[in-house]
Amino acid sequence: MAAYPSVNWWSGNIRRFESRVSFALRFRELNCISGRKCLDFLSINPVDDTPVGSGDIKRLSAILGEPLSDVESLFARSMGFDDCGRYAPPRRGRGRQFVRYCDVCANCGYHSYLHELEWLAKCPFHGCELKEAWIGKHAGSIALQHMDALNAVMHNQCGSWPHYDNDFPAANQEHIVALENWVVRARRAATRASDAEIWCSAPHAILGNISLAQAFGQLRALACMPEVIEPFVIETGGTWRVQRRQFPNEAKLEIERLDILGVSFSRVLEAYQSIAYVSAGPPPFVTRLEQAKNALQERHGRCHCEWGLFRGGWESHWVKVYPDEQQYRSLSCPFEVALEELERGWGGPGEALIGRKAVQEQLRFIFLAHEMHTAGLIRYKSDADVSSDGYLYVGQDLTSCCIWEEKSPLTKLLDTASTWEIDSACSALSMWLDDIEEGVRPAQRDDPKYCVRLGKAGTGLSLIRWIPAFGAGRPRRPPDPSDVSQVQ
Ligand SMILES: [Zn+2]
Ligand SMILES: [Zn+2]
């Protein structure tokens, strides 16, 4: 601080929606200092989107002579989906090698964080295509490289750089206002849904981000998007709908009781699916699974598939095959893979208990059963072989040793969640198979994720299922119309 008694900056110099890189770069240029000194002095990372603490905001406000609210808006982006949990669109990787900008904005010495958002297709101020300035391959931090790349753009485009001589951007452009209002509404709804969430489905533990199309389809269902901003969004995501079912307070209290015991809903669901699948009177989700498998087999008929899955030791890949030739018979076709996925996902651990990982799977199930038994969710059959401390012994049909307590306030919820998971998987598999029939390679698959979610709602619980009614811009098979409503 002692080395910088005053700075060349003035109140009102921060520009609306300005990017952090642009702000840091202008500070560097106006004060004729090196990038490194600039970043040390400001003590910010301009290529990082994480929030800046209130202490730093106050410090910068005092140094720059800018109102606190303007410094806050520089670091807390009003148009972003940062707090939306699993509803958020995928974010760019940390090491992006270019700065995205608008030529016309750059004429005014202006660069906005809006230019860098993946989900915006065009400059929101001018409607023109965005350009990319690749960062040079030289030493220095990624932040400095981004500043240098933007500096080169500005020197080319803006005669008065680093000064600007107009009041661009104007605050009241119609579509900017509409865009900002929509983002605020959609973010609020998504944050509320995300905060209330207790569990979301991730069959086969396929995690990661949802696609841009899914994110925007869902956000548009949560908050209706004005037509005026649609052309600015890279992907509107088609129409998504939500199926919703309420469960009473009794179920919520049971979840809370289990939470205190350290038993998660996903563990309970896994146990329920394994045990109910082999029970004497299988619950409705098992019937749905059988229907789904039959429908797939019927659609498949005699195999004419042109793809086979080659499974190596650690990896597998799809190869083109001629279905009638003997050499390809050992490979699974897409329909067989789809059937396997359904069986592996909801067919109980029976099959898994035979394979290579049988021992681990058996042990896993023994611990799972013990956890459920302790929580009072299952009973062991009278003839089950159980140790004195309540663990099943190996060497018996483990899942058949357990009886689900039908009276549990969660039974109906668990069955509906399982049924909806199967419905979601079928819908995704059917889209994948449609795509393959239309010439898409089977490896190009991006199923919707986290489609079934459980959240707290008032005095009870709300189970929801997200349903893509249209995918990739073309009509799909319509979803089951039962119980479907628009979210608002
Ligand atoms: Zn522009
Ligand atoms: Zn086939």
Image (spheres, rainbow, N blue to C red):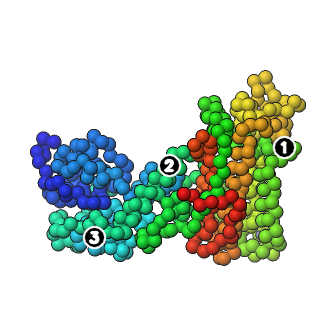
Nearest to N terminus: mark 3 or mark 1: 3
Residue at image position (27%, 45%) is 57
State whether residue 146 appears in this view.
no
- Residue appearing at x 80%, y 32% in the figure: 379
Q: Three-letter amino acid code at disc 3?
A: Cys
The residue beneath circle 1 is 279
Judged left or right of residue 15, residue 362 is right
Crowdedness near tag 1: few (<14), some (14–19) or many (≥20) residues, C-alpha within 10 Å: some
User: Are the two marked residues, 2 and 3, in contact with CB atoms closer than 8 angstroms?
Assistant: no
Mark 2 or mark 1: whose residue is earlier in sequence: 2
Q: Which type of secondary structure does the marked residue at label 2 adopt?
A: helix
Q: CA distance from mark 2 to mark 1?
A: 38 Å
- Residue underneath mark 2: 192
The answer to whether any part of residue 34 appears in the image is yes
Determine the residue positioned at 85% across, 33% down: 381
As drawn, 378 above or below 122: above
Point out residue 28 in the picture as x, y percentages from the top left corner.
19, 56
Q: Amino acid at mark 1?
A: Ser
CA separation in Å, label 3 and label 1 = 66 Å
- 149 lies above or below 370: below
Q: Residue at x 78, y 56 (%)?
A: 288
Cα separation, mark 2 vs mark 3, equals: 35 Å
Q: Is mark 3 within 8 Å of ligand 1?
A: yes
User: Which of label 2 and label 3 is nearer to you?
Assistant: 2
- Quarter of the render that holds ligand 2: bottom right
Q: Secondary structure at mark 1?
A: loop
Dot 2 amino acid type:
Arg
Residue 172: horizontal and vertical position, in percent?
A: 30, 66
| Residue on which disc 3 sits | 105
Residue 161 numbered tag: none
In the rendered structure, the answer to whether residue 197 lies left or right of residue 115 reads right
Q: Secondary structure at mark 3?
A: helix
